[in-house]
Amino acid sequence: MKKAKRYGMVIDLDKCTGCGSCMAACMAENNVPFREDESNKLLSITWMRVYKLTNKKPFPETDVCYLPRPCMHCAGQHEGHSPCVSVCPATATDYSMKTGIVSQIYTRCFGCRYCMASCPYHARYFNWWDPVWPDGMEKYLNPNVSPRMRGVVEKCSFCFHRYQLAKEKAYMEGRRELEEDEYQTSCTQACPADAITFGDLNNPQHAVYKNKKSPNAFRLLERLGTNPKVYYTSSREWVRRSGDNYLKNEGKPAKAVHHG
Amino acid sequence: MKIDRRSFLSFLIGGAAGTALSPMPLKLTDDSSIWTQMWPWTPVPEDGEISHVNSTCTLCPGHCGITVRKINDRAVKIEGMKGHPVNDGGICLLGLSGLQLLYGPARVKTPLKRVGARGSGRWKKISWDAAVSEVVKQLGDLRAEGKSHSVGLITGSDRGTVSQLFARLMTAYGSPNVMRTPSMLDSYELTLQLTQGTRALPGFDFENADFILSFGSGIIDGWGSPVRMFKAFSGWRSNHGKVVQIEPRLSRTAAKSDRWIPVKPGTEGVLALGLAHVIIKEALYNSDFIDNYSVGFEDLKRLVLDKYSPDNVAAITAIDHKDIVTLARDFAAASKPLAICGRGRGSVAGSLDEFMAVQALNALVGNINKKGGVRAVSEIDYINWPEVQMDAVAAAGMQRERLDGAGSKKYPDTRYLLNRLPAAISSGEESSLAALLVTGANPLYTMPGSTAVKKAMAGIGFVVSFSSYMDETAQNADLILPNHTYLERFEDVPTPFGLQQPVTSLARPVVEPQFNTQHVGDVVIRIAKALGGSIAGAFPWEGYQTCLKETLGHKWETLITKGFLLDDNYRAFARQMKFDTPSGKFEFANKKTGRVPQFAPIKIEGDAKLYPLILVPYDSFRLAGDYIGSPPFAVKTVEDTVLKGKDVFVELNPETARALRLREGQHAILSTPRGQAKVKVHWFDGIRPGVVALPRGLGHTAYDKYLAEKGVNFNELIGPVEDPGTGWDAAWGIMAKLTKA
């Protein structure tokens, strides 16, 4: 049997400029709402959020790095045991064994926010208010992604609707397999610095397969055992070390452990 | 049956267990989510036929190709156009948010005439006929009084057919007062004219350069054509190209560069001369270029050897002299070094001496007109309209001195000096401005000394804005004739700043006009025709589209099918070493005009005793800084250490903050000789002590509630400082003080 797909991302932090295109591309593609004041970042819904990291050294040794954070689509210790999927009482979030994508089904979610508490990456957001688009602006809403309503949790879906569309197209053309470029997330496509690569982590033909094996690759909070499918690469050691919590005198971080 | 305690409890427990095992709880949770979610006011986007339209983004001077995804007649997503010579599929934050501008609440939906006091926001909707006749009446009256020269035009660009139509209108009408929004384009154009004999766009071969020396240019903060710069930057990361960033603050560009040189603000030009000193003294320059293709090298040599030794430069710039020597050696030793300048996004024209010093570095390493170097770009030449036949009034008007002093004896080489306009108006000279037309610009927000600009504008009798959006200038105009947005109109889009290969792109209507707006090109032609006589005669076209088609000739077909047009005559990396200067060579100095290499530092406004800190602006890619206001998506991406609620943060080195007893997040009053504002303090190690940094792009009073009244407009705190040789605004900062609020 053909191996299941594990869609994932490798983000090159040396190339990432922190420009924010990925965030806007995500908002535009996924009908992410906005409010008058978005400066309270705990309430600001950003499926993709770019964090600013600093090395905490004084002038002029200071250094800054930007880190885009989509949903990590964690596989957990055993494929399917994502922190959020394990706790959802309503089966509103599920792990796809076919693609490795963690879904979010808005109409099933009743807003207990258990998943938000369990997500170590703050990748999930709750709709405290109904989304409101200024008069006329609802014209740009994408019909492939349903707008959410007050009381549900939402998060990055790796643009799953794009996967569905690509699969449909392939099916119509009598193919079963997707080419690498047929299914790309909105942020990957938009990134003007080509910092994001997206594809099947199990497929040696895909760029992500090679990129995740870089000696500079790491994942966020790896030691929690969440087994995320988003990898980062950085040539700066302090950046790699920011990916997890270390004791003060702990040695260099262990080499990234690759699952699956 | 008797109900005892035992059977009652059994019933309860059994019932509970039964319910729990039944599908009921699941069904209830499912239902509860359905009952509480299916509201009629949650929009359900209509599905339909998918189509794609290729066009060009004109929200910034980057001019990227875009592909817009449509569902039926709705535009739903803007993406980068694959294969476009500028951006090849990439797209930036602002470009992605374009639909929020198209469908957004900041649009001016119909021609508006002011009824209340200026800026009070009270408008009357009027018809297009009434709006055009109002303009024609005012302009006609002024002309009849022989005051045609008292009409001014502020434009965002002077390239492409729309800008040229405006310029043509002004010439035929009889006013020399056409002013382009200032930017580093002014200084680069003049630098190229003085050194290479061509007033042209600069073209940089970033893709092939391997050592970038940036004097404060925000390579990834919006300098030049942003997406192209992102791509070039990404290329350097893959090909081990080196980037050295010289600026007092750890900007995104500085953080991502290989070396950050945290120079004292305003001394970048001195550092460039210091590097030249080392390169010349150690004979590291390209002697082939210097000996065969340049003149005036001795003058440069004299200047830098005299005054700019590494020790002197170290004292001025606060950079260690060893670092200066190393940097100069590295630059000269690189196989394809390239030096650039224009601070941040390049929205200030700056000091000509500084641009000349940086260009001298390029010439010293001989990278003029070669692979990985810099060249003067000749644009695709397609606007060949017949000369305007001026009548007596127009001819007399065009003879008058420009109000801003550009081209006068004092500033002979300068073409536009918009920064001098407010002072010229307020000085109450006889030839003050009676009417002002504004297109593709928002001077009330983007010009330094906003308060003075606003005051000057209040003295102008009649202000017309052609803006698509209710920006600050439109808000304070007497009449708004709203243009279609870039997604609703045809327009030829010229070569973006910095590209070596000339490319003309086509913006075309992606959707039908959403509101009662008209193409500004059509409006100009209508106004001209209504003014009659020789003015009407200069506009033989029926409308803008005919004009564009006729002007482009056979090129139109290419544009409409491909979306862009490349110059057939362009040869990449053709090593053309003939210059259009009097000597035919690259001129470090020009004996004829008496122009020799020199350097006068720009002294910023403010007394250091009263204002001990230096306030500098910074450009952040998340906020649009030009005449376009940031759409909601962009504002949403702004970090909470930049904007929190309505408060903007200034960046301050912790050392300075401690000395001033200002805590992280504390409110403070930021004052400069030009004004003061309430800000919050953000401790940031990546800024030179003694320097305060404030982001550009906030403090709008216009646009929509997602942008307006948030933060402070940097331009309210700074005023223009004239560059001695050219009259441009060269203020890179202003002295300031911070006190507890």
Image (tube, helix red, strand yellow):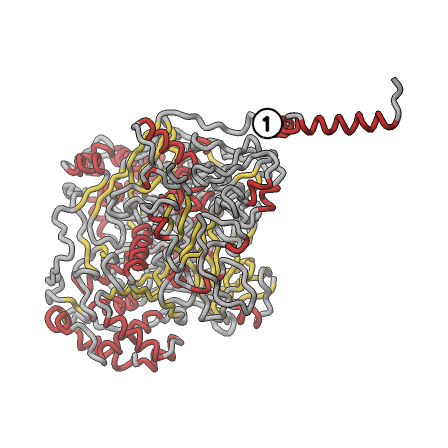
The answer to whether A108 is drawn above or below residue B611 in the figure is above
Q: Nearer the viewer, residue A65 or B478?
A: A65
The quadrant in which the C terminus of chain B is found is: bottom right
Residue B505 visible in the picture: yes
Q: Residue at x 35, y 66 (%)?
A: B258
Q: In the image, residue A150 lies at what x, y percent?
A: 58, 34
Residue B173 visible in the picture: no
The quadrant in which the N terminus of chain B is found is: top right
Q: Nearer the viewer, residue A206 or B549?
A: A206
The answer to whether B230 is drawn above or below residue A4 in the figure is below
Residue holding disc 1: B34
Chain identity of mark 1: B
Q: In the image, residue B44 lies at what x, y percent?
A: 48, 27
Which image quarter: residue B137? top left
Left or right of B25, for residue A53: left
Q: Residue furthest top?
A: B1
Q: Nearer the viewer, residue B57 or B68?
A: B68
Q: Nearer the viewer, residue B499 or B265?
A: B499
Identity, as a three-letter code, of the amino acid under mark 1: Ile
Q: Residue at x 33, y 62 (%)?
A: B350
